[in-house]
Structures are given as C-alpha cells and as structure tokens.
Image: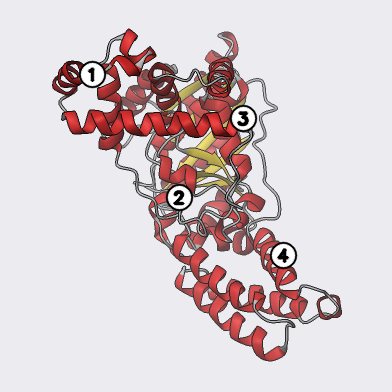
Amino acid sequence: MFESLGDRLQSAIHKIKGYGKITEENIDQAMREIRLALLEADVNYKVVKEFTSKVKEKSLGEEVKSSINPGDLFVKIVKDELVELLGGESKPLNLNGNPAVLMLVGLQGSGKTTTIGKLSLFLRKKHSKKPLLVACDVYRPAAIEQLKTIGRELNIEVYSEGKKDPVEISQNAIKYAKENGFDYVLIDTAGRLHIDEELMHELENIKSKINPEEVLLVIDAMMGQDAINVIEGFNNNLDLTGVILTKLDGDTRGGVALSVRHLTNVPIKFIGVSEKMDGLDMFDPERMAGRILGMGDVVSLVEKAYDAIDEKEAEKTAKKMQQGKFDLEDFLSTMKQMKKLGPLENLLKLIPGAKKMGLNNVKVDPKQIARIEAIVLSMTIEERRNPAIIKSSRKTRIARGSGTSVQEVNKLLTQFDQMKKMMKQFSNGNMKLPF
C-alpha cells in the first residue's frame, strides 16, 4: 500500500536533505513534488493544500534556520504532519459493554461480511475472549449462509433467525449472548446505499434498540474520494464511531486514508491488508506515516511475530543455531513458523530502510518455497538431522519423492551448508556486519 506515494515523497525529501540550508526556493521545489504526489495518490485537494502549507510554514520557521541538519528536521516535519493528517493517534475500540456490541454497516460489495469475520478473529486472538456473529443481512441472497461459512471456518458461533426482522434479531442475539457467556456481539447488517432512506431508517432503529459500543462503517479504499461522501452520508444518520478501510493492499494510491479523518472527523480504526482472514490490522497513524516515508514498521513486525511464532520453539531453534547444531528438521520448523507471518515480501517492507536495501521490491515465489518444503519432507528423520549422509542414491530418492530434480536437492543442501557456516561465524563473533 502507498508504494507510489511513498516513493514520490521520499524522492522530494531526499532532495531537501542534499541542501545545507532550507530556503524559499528549494522548499518550493520540494513542496511542488509533494503536492503532485499527494494529488496523484487521490488525496483531496483541500487536504493537500492545507498539508503543504503547514509543512512549508514550519520548514521556514526560525527553529529550522538554526538547525545543524535542516534535512533531517524536514523529514520530521513531514512525518509529524502526516501523522496529524492520519488522525494523530490510534483510536482503540470501545469494548466496555457486557457483552460489547459492535454494529458493522456499509455499502453493498464493500466486503462487510468478510470483514466482520476478520474482526471477530482479531478480537478472539487479541483479547482471548468469545465473539458471537449475528446475521442481520436478511435481504442479500446467501448472505446468512456466507456468514455461517465464515463462522465454521473460524470456529466462531453465528446467531441467525433467517429472514425475520433485523431489529428483533439483533435484540434477541444480545440476550442470547448474555445468557451464554459471549464477550462480543458483532452484528452484520445489510449492505445499502446511504441514500436509501428505508434501509437507513432500519439501521437507525437497530442502533437505537441495541445501543452498540461501536458503529463501524466498512468501506472499500479503492472508491477513492467518493468514499468521503459515503462516510458523511452514513455519519449524518448513525453518528459513526469509526471506519474500516478494506482492500488497502490492492490500492496503489490509497489517498482516501489520508483524507478521511481530516474531512469527516471519523477515525480509521482498522485496515484490510490481505484477503486472508487474519488480514486485518489496527490503524496506527504513527506507524502508517513511518511506512509511507520508508522508515519501516518494526512494531507491526514484532506484533506479527509474537502472534504467529511459538516462543519456546523459537528459543530452542536460536540455541541450536548458536551451538552450530541447526539441522534440516529445525529448518523445516522455522519455515512453517515463517509462513504463519504471511507473504515474506510484505514482511520485508516493514524493515526500516527496506527500500535502500532493495527489499521493497523483492518477490518471493510461494511455489519455490513449497518445492523446498517438499524436498525436506521427502527426507528421512535421520537425513534431516544429519544431511552429511545424503549421497547420490539418497538424492535420487528424495528428488523423486518431492517431484523435483537432483540439481534442486543439491542446491538446497549447498545453501543450507552455507547458512550453517554463516551462523557459526556470527555465534563466534567473527562475522562483521555490513554497516
């Protein structure tokens, strides 16, 4: 997300960092580039005008003139203004109800039903509590069955009464949740146009009867600036508590994320970052600004690792690496844990300085990873623990069993051997870091 915008902003900032002093002339050139970058990213023109004016004003202030390194201070000013534009600070969900009730609304086709599944999974993993999904979309064909399918996939219960009155269904669902010890109730309402008065009135009725802690609008980020009108339409009727932007991973521009809070005063609370059910992240303006400016997002990287990786298994593997006892069985275990973190290329982008190191455009072929896994799985336990015994006849058997070639088996063994040597050098303190 934001790749094109990030590249353009970083290019403009880089030019300023090359000057010994910020002047009216060189700041105007940089601001022109930043203005174009934001407009091309589909950021609202009023927002762009205000943002660039603030950056320029602060960059030409007395505190910058006396700075030893004005280029670095310019980076800080741009980042601070981006953070402010994105909402200043993250706005967590209000989960104080017993149970906490979250009502999701949105247009048809916005990804609302899938998002409610993602959100329920997020809440269960994050807080280790029990969510209940409620099927109140009684108009769209197969909407109830879609929610039930998601519930089965995630092992999360779905409350449904079929094609009855959505207001009554939501009230009955909350009663059921209280009686059965559910911590969260997530209500999936029917998708509609914000100009559809009858259906909008139904939403108002549901809200007034159940008094939810959160009313979240699910909206497709690829709508661009039309999203602002949709948010305002829903907000005027329902007093939204937050927005969930879906498909932000597929939007190369993403300017709506930079316009929402400033124009509507409705905070972005979550963003959809992949089609997988765990592809929902809390929206944090500080982290997002850092990612846009190529500063990485180490906190998100650590959180992903913490959620996905078995701590004891990781410690055990680390010790074996240090002792030079890391074998192909450990390698296979590490690969399986890494796969839980999601696509490797997405993780590399979170590393600070990824662009400079050429990691932002790395493409990892999942088929190649699957082939490596197949090769290791075709080995016996003895071979994985002691790769030195794998000679010609064993290689032929492994290649045949994994559907690969002997050359590919040789390549993996060679790379593994090189990796072990490198680990040994690091653990002995003999390897110099390349910076």
Res 330 visible = yes
Mark nearer the N terminus (4 vs 3): 4
Mark nearer the N terminus (3 vs 2): 2
Disc on res. 179: none
Mark nearer the N terminus (4 vs 1): 4
At 66% across and 75% down in the image, what residue appears? 17
Q: Secondary structure at mark 4?
A: helix
At 60% across and 64% down in the image, what residue appears? 263
Instruction: Quickly name the residue at label 2.
Output: 219
Instruction: Quickly name the residue at label 4.
Output: 76
Res 228 visible = no
At 67% across and 44% down in the image, what residue appears? 91
Amino acid type, label 2: Ile
Is 277 on the left or on the right of 408, as rendered? right
Q: Of tags 3 and 2, which is closer to the observer? A: 3
Mark nearer the N terminus (3 vs 1): 1
Residues 333 and 79: in front is: 333
